[in-house]
Amino acid sequence: MLRLLLVSLVLRSASGSLPLDGGVQERAPVPPGAGLCPSPCQCEEDGILLLVDCSELGLSAVPTDLSPLTSYLDLSMNNISELQPNAFHNLHFLGELRLSGNHLRDVPGQVFTGLYNLKVLMLQNNQIERLPSETPWDLPNLLSLRLDANLISEVPEQTFLGLHSLRHLWLDDNALTEIPVRALNNLPSLQAMTLALNRISHIPDTAFRNLSSLVVLHLHNNMIQTLGKDCFEGLHSLETLDLNYNDLQEFPMAIRTLAKLQELGFHNNNIKAIPERAFVGNPLLQTIHFYENPIQSVGKSAFQFLPKLHTLSLNGATEIREFPDLKGTTSLEILTLTRAGLTSLPRSLCQQLPSLRVLELSHNQIEELPSFSHCQRLQEIGLQHNLIREIEARTFQQLSSLRSLDLSWNRIEAIHNDAFASLQSLVKLDLTENQLSTLPLEGLGGLTHLKLKGNLALSVSFTEEDFPKMRVIEMPYAYQCCVYGACNNNYKAASQWDTEQTGHEEEDLHKRTIALFPIHTDTNYDLDMEEFQLEVEDSKLQTSIQCTPTPGPFKPCDYMFDSWVVRLGVWAIALVSLVGNSLLIVTVFASPSYLSPVKFVIGSIGGANLLTGLCAAALALVDALTFGEFSQHGARWENGPGCQATGFLSVFASEASILFLTLAAVQCSVSVSCVRAYGKSPSFSSVKAAALCCVGLSLAVAALPLFRVGEYGSSPLCLPSPLPEGQPSTLGFMVALIMMNTLCFLVITGTYIKLYWDLMKGEFDSIWDCAMIKHVAWLIFTNCLLYCPVAFLTFSSLLSLFPVGEEVIKSVLLVLLPLPASLNPLLYLLFNPHFKEDLRLLWRKSQAAQEETLDSFVSEETEKSSYDSTQALVSFSDVDMLFESAVLPKIESLRYSTTSPSVPLIPCQQQTPPRRENTLGPSSGPRLKDEQLLKSDDLERNSPSTPSFHSSVYHSSSFSSHL
């Protein structure tokens, strides 16, 4: 064999592939199937040796033509399910063998015979269930063995007998239920081992007694509940112990035997108490991860006198009420104690921890802060989600190294003017969601990141001179970003706080910094890397400031209304609505004429429209008063009572108008049906009760945003935001509002279609007056026509069905939404004949009190005939025809012979009803009451030729009351 090797070397040197002068030879690829490289693998030369890559080729067996000079063989990610005993018998130079990701179930001991130079063996991600027991692997120089991610449930005692040099062993992610104590006793050189992700529930005494060289031991993600008192005996070199994610019930006192322990992790267990002098046998401890345990008590001396400790993490200890005593632990640099129950901090905190660089105390109940002036190395403080109310002048004095300060989600109402004066290195300040009304600027000139979002009382505008180095800033209101040129698109918007997307240059910078400074993912802090990034970024020319929230159509900088067309439109709508609806209400409710149910509902709609006009006038007035400088007043307007009242009245008026219109349509249809079926319509009191219910429902809907269901102050229009980035409650409120209004319009349309369909079929014999019915129909048509684009665009914007510009939505809300409030009264004033008559009656009422009595009497009696549109469809019997010929002509003669005005009867259809032999039944149409019929007969007999004025009026009144 040696002779063959020498011959091969001579041949290779003669061909020039091997330098004879000792120079460095680059690796050259060898084509598949070319002499030494098996097909279809890929090979590279490494001097006289060969690197063979046969991974991911779908192989079902080990290639048989492997070169004896192979030093590296990768057979991973194939379909090999069995290894032949002589598969590698001639690979004496093989140093690394990869068999991971196959389907191996068993690996016999004879397979690796002769691999005396093998140092790395990878068998992870297979289906191995058994390890060799009778014939152990004979791999005297093996340094690393990976058996993780298999199905191993037991490790026989003889398995590792021939692995005397093994240093790294992976047995994690298997099915082990106990520590393989006897098998591990044969590994005296082992330095790192992981038994994580198994089903181990107990660690017995002396489980690792022969592993005196072991430095790293991972036991996380098991089911360990108990530890033997001497379970770690013999681990004289152990520096890292990982017991995280187990089910430990008590503090592991067995760690006291680990004199060289430097890093300890047992977070996410069920440990409830840390005893006194818990780490007395671990003087070299540097890092303790103890978070996510239900800790209820901590011994006063538990963390005392640990001079090497630099990282302590106690997150999630919800029952801790007092800050731990850290006397003698003077090297501590990173202290994390979040989601605990701390209510105060000791005043001697910085005297005990002079080296502290990072202090994270978020999610506690701290109300008052001590002075941190002696922690002069502090670079980062996290106090978010506490109950702090005030920052005093002494709190952060002399912290010249402090770079990041997080005070967000507290209740801070006041900050002393000199609180930040000595923070010369401060670049990040987070004051989100507090109750600040002012912000002291002394000492904040070096800030590059500032967050003030959620401080609704802080409406003052800042200038660029206040923060000359600012790069990222979050304001309570978009108006405060106007000073940074956000409206002119000179500055870009951003929603990031710690990361800025500025192109490939930033990505390259990030990659370089990661390469220079490795990140410790367990602690989430790397101050050196952050400092390096900030210094490099500061050295670049800053041409942009990222300010959020970004101004836009709903957060304007200069003018509340974007264009003069919208401005003039709003003014026109407001004026017409105020004048028209006021005139309508006066003529309807102040007129001495008869107030029918439909007329009452029309007047109620006018009242709701009047409120809409008031809201439009209020917005127009605000626009005029803040013309050209709206950003200086926008925040105060949104949060003021004026905007809240305007929003409330606007939603109330809009909903009331739609509900009243629904009531009018339903009342017309129901009344006509009742008159036709029963000879009478619903009482006026029932209509008033329904109107009162409409008012109550509208009030309830309008009041929801006052109880955090929606928000009136989300925009200067004082309406719940129609934009998809609004709060979830606002989104739900707006969608529900649109759906409810759409349902009302469907009910209105269906009701009136049925009513007109019945008219077209001629089911009624005659209509005396349909002016009000036609008026309601016009209201339905115009209101529905104008509401459709409002509902469609708003709904599309809320659900992001398709992109709709904010300018379009704003114009629709300002113009189309209140437009019916101005059109509705115009339809009544210009086209309804009853308005002119009511106006005439009001004029005559002011002339003479004596004429007023007679005029109002005649008008009221006649109005009952002409206004009651809901009883307008009448069928006539023989008796009805008698009254038509005998009574009505007298009324007509009376109308023309007297000076009293009356509303003319306006028929929608006129036809002569056929004479009927039988009297009308209950379902044949409206009938006079028996008592009235008798009175009419008596009057006719007593005075057949010259009926008196009183008699004629009485017949007319009694007859028309059924119409």
Image: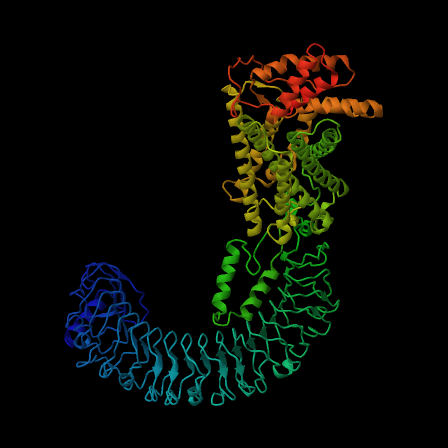
Name of the residue lying farthest toward the top: 945
Above or below — where is 307 with respect to 716? below
Does the image show residue 774?
yes
Measured from the top left, where is residue 852 in percent x and y? 80, 24
Measured from the top left, where is residue 811 in percent x and y? 63, 37
Residue at the spot 52% in from the left edge and 56% down from the top edge: 505
Residue at the spot 85% in from the left edge and 24% down from the top edge: 848
Side of 554 where 256 appears, left or right: left
839, 140: nearer the viewer: 839
**Displayed quadrant of residue 265:** bottom left
734, 238: nearer the viewer: 734
Colouring chosen for the image of the structure: rainbow
Q: Classify the position of the N terminus by image quarter.
A: bottom left
Measured from the top left, where is residue 597 in percent x and y? 65, 31
Residue at the spot 35% in from the left edge and 82% down from the top edge: 202
Q: Classify the position of the C terminus by image quarter.
A: top right
The total number of labels drawn is 0
Side of 92 where 687 appears, left or right: right
Measured from the top left, where is residue 350 in percent x and y? 64, 80
Does the image show residue 448?
no
787, 219: nearer the viewer: 787
Side of 521 where 465 appears, left or right: right
955, 619: nearer the viewer: 955
**Displayed quadrant of residue 766:** top right
